[in-house]
């Protein structure tokens, strides 16, 4: 598995060289990889800050509309069960995020984890998809704020002229100055510092939470007063059956997207091993409780079939004589949108900075302000692009693209947990500047091993395993792993460990294939019954076999030392990550075809950028991979601290 000197400089004619580019993996940040020319972000965040960021990013204005749509079309009074099931599904991803965030607390979130566990190619696609998610998501949220603000001031056209939407018939464009201004204001807050940004988001989120508590308390009072008429319907608690409830759960699942923003701030957390898992767990728990309580109240006030799909909460209160409650609910919707806007823009600069650190994007995005310790160039670039989109484009049709980035990230995080547990990286990339130190270290220990075995340490000139110290750009036949393994004789246990890793690697790959086959065949009704059942059976068999194999074989002992050991440990592995993969792949498969066409265009642009820039400027371009156990000794012998 060792990758030797100059192994990444193959041209386009070498397909193997291109493949090695895609699978090369970077090291978890440690003392050796803290480079002086890569300034670190400020460690200012604690658990309250993380909860504010997580809740603010998750609870958007959609919940004020979603309850009516899902109750009328999918669940009926069982709306609460939809939010509970969706919350449990989101918790599967949250567990995976919590372990990786505490073990690898660096900027970049899912991109960073994928780069460490899976490889550069997949990491690039994850990062590129997340850039799309946060840009489109922020612009779409900003476009939704101005209509709600107008309602607070008396009506649809009550905003000042310079902030009101204007339509240009000749260009068929509806510009939204208010949305663009709000994006720039939020960008300015984010440039002040992460602690200040989290405080501002906490204040806005508190207003939104108080509005939801008003809905719960006042709605509960009205429900007891009127006898909860919404539950007294002849169709029962499940008017659309269990299938309808599950369909509603898939719809409301996206209302939990946002807790991953907490993971994106990992580098700025004071105590990441403790605070990140708690921040993610508390954020998701608070959101789930609020969603369920609101849904209990609303479906109890009005029969599900009589709900207004556009303003379900306001109309429910109005039908019970509390028209004035609409103002409080509108304030909650506005603050929810603003906090979601901040949560959409906050992670992207950190992903851009992480990708620039790895050489996959220009160093322009790498600059960190010395006073605020914020990636200022990345933040400004994100804000400017999002404000332009919010000003000129109605991005509501592109909103489905936001889900693709999130679900791809969730899937790869679950895969990364399986890799971490069963086949964690056993080699570490070192810079080519340490070539002579590595060669001398290998020669010294290779000679020691031969003396122990009673062999002549002198090597013949034709021995392919002898490193060529005078030629630093020569690939040799024997890998670094093979040379250092000469320190001890091969035993049956070593062979078994090698086979275990191979079996685990293939099993994880087959689990992903099985999840795709099962969900694709189950979701496409245009297949004949025979083909559908056959494919579903094959996919289910692969998944079940993978679960059984991973359950029976041992997890890798090195998982205890991976990254920053001692943090949160994801429970029920491999069942939990496999369930997470299955759910997220199912949701990805069921997105609209038009959404996938748009996303494919974006991903193709990303492939071109990586091909012509990223792979040629990667920080791992000339990396030398050595066994993890020998890294500290090599650094000590060389005296190099990067």
Image (cartoon, rainbow, N blue to C red):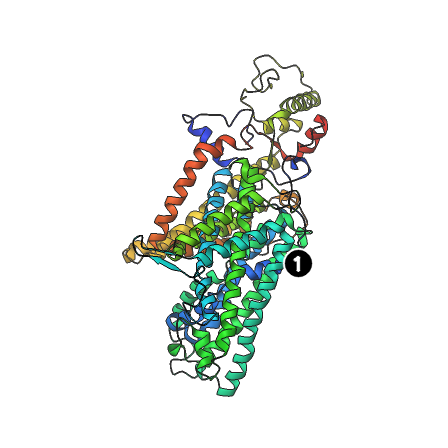
How many dots with numbers? 1
> Relative to residue 39, is residue 252 drawn left or right?
left
> Relative to residue 490, is residue 64 drawn left or right?
left
CA neighbours of label 1 inside 10 A, class few (<14), some (14 to 19), many (20+): many
Q: Compared with residue 409, is residue 328 higher up or lower down, i.e. above or below?
A: below
Picture coordinates of residue 138 (x, y %)? 48, 54
Picture coordinates of residue 622 (x, y %)? 55, 27
Residue at 53% x, 30% y: name it: 621
Picture coordinates of residue 425 (x, y %)? 58, 39
> Which of the 4 quarters of the picture holds residue 448?
top right
> Relative to residue 443, is residue 108 drawn left or right?
left
Q: Residue furthest front?
A: 161
Quadrant including the N terminus: top right
> Relative to residue 21, is residue 278 drawn left or right?
right
Quadrant including the C terminus: top right
- Can I make out residue 251 in this image? yes
Residue at 59% x, 40% y: name it: 367
Q: Which residue is mark 1?
A: 47
- Can I make out residue 544 in this image? no
Picture coordinates of residue 594 (x, y %)? 33, 52
Q: Compared with residue 420, is residue 36 higher up or lower down, i.e. above or below?
A: above
Q: Compared with residue 357, is residue 515 higher up or lower down, i.e. above or below?
A: below
> Which of the 4 quarters of the picture holds residue 449?
top right
């Amino acid at each position: 598995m060792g990758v030797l000197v100059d192994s990444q400089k193959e041209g386009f004619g070498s397909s193997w060289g291109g493949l090695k580019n895609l699978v090369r993996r970077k090291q978890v940040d440690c003392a050796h990889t803290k480079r002086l020319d890569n300034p670190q972000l400020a460690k200012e965040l604690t658990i309250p800050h993380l909860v504010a960021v997580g809740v603010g990013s998750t609870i958007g204005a959609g919940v004020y509309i979603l309850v009516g749509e899902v109750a009328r079309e999918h669940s009926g009074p069982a709306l609460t069960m939809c939010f509970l099931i969706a919350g449990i599904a989101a918790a599967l991803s949250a567990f995976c995020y919590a372990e990786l965030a505490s073990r690898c607390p660096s900027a970049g979130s899912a991109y960073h984890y994928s780069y460490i566990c899976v490889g550069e190619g997949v990491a690039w696609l994850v990062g590129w998809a997340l850039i799309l998610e946060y840009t489109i998501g922020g612009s779409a949220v900003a476009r939704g704020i101005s209509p709600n603000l107008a309602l607070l001031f008396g009506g649809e056209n009550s905003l000042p002229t310079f902030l009101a939407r204007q339509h240009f018939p000749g260009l068929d464009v509806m510009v939204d100055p208010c949305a663009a201004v709000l994006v720039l204001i939020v960008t300015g807050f984010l440039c002040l510092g992460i602690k200040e940004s989290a405080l501002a988001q906490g204040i806005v989120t508190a207003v939104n939470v108080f509005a939801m508590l008003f809905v719960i308390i006042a709605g509960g009072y009205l429900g007891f007063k009127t006898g909860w008429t919404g539950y007294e319907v002849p169709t029962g608690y499940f008017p659309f059956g269990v299938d309808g409830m599950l369909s509603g759960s898939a719809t409301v699942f996206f209302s939990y997207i946002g807790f991953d923003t907490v993971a994106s701030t990992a580098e700025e957390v004071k105590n990441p091993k403790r605070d990140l898992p708690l921040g993610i767990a508390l954020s998701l728990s608070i959101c789930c409780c609020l969603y369920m309580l609101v849904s209990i109240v609303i479906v109890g006030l009005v029969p599900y079939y009589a709900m207004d799909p556009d303003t379900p909460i306001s109309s429910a209160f109005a039908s019970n004589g509390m028209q004035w409650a609409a103002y409080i609910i509108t304030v909650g919707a506005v603050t929810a949108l603003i906090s979601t806007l901040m949560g959409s823009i906050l992670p992207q600069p950190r992903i851009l900075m992480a990708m620039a650190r790895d050489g996959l994007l220009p160093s322009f995005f790498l600059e960190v302000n010395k006073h605020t310790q914020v990636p200022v160039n990345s933040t400004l670039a994100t804000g400017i692009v999002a404000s332009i989109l919010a000003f000129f484009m109605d991005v509501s049709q592109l909103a489905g693209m936001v889900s693709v980035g999130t679900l791809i990230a969730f899937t790869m995080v679950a895969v990364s947990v399986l890799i971490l547990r069963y086949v964690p990286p056993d080699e570490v990339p070192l810079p080519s500047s340490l070539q002579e130190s590595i060669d001398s270290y290998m020669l010294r220990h290779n000679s020691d091993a031969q003396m122990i075995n009673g062999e002549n340490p002198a090597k013949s000139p034709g021995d392919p395993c002898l490193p060529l110290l005078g030629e630093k750009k020569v690939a040799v036949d024997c890998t670094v792993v093979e040379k250092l393994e000469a320190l001890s004789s091969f035993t049956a246990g070593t062979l078994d460990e090698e086979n275990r890793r191979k079996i685990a690697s293939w099993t994880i790959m087959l689990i992903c294939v099985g999840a795709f086959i099962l969900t694709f065949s189950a979701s496409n009704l245009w297949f004949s019954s025979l083909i559908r059942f056959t494919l579903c059976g094959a996919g289910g068999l692969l998944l079940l076999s993978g679960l059984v194999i991973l359950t029976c074989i041992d997890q890798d002992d090195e998982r205890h030392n991976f990254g920053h050991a001692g943090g949160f440990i994801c429970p029920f592995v491999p069942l939990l990550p496999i369930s997470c993969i299955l759910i997220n792949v199912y949701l990805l498969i069921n997105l609209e075809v038009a959404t996938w066409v748009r996303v494919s265009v974006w991903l193709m642009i990303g492939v071109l950028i990586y091909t012509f820039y990223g792979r040629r400027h990667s920080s791992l371009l000339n990396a030398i991979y050595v066994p993890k156990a020998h890294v500290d000794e090599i650094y000590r012998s060389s005296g190099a601290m990067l």
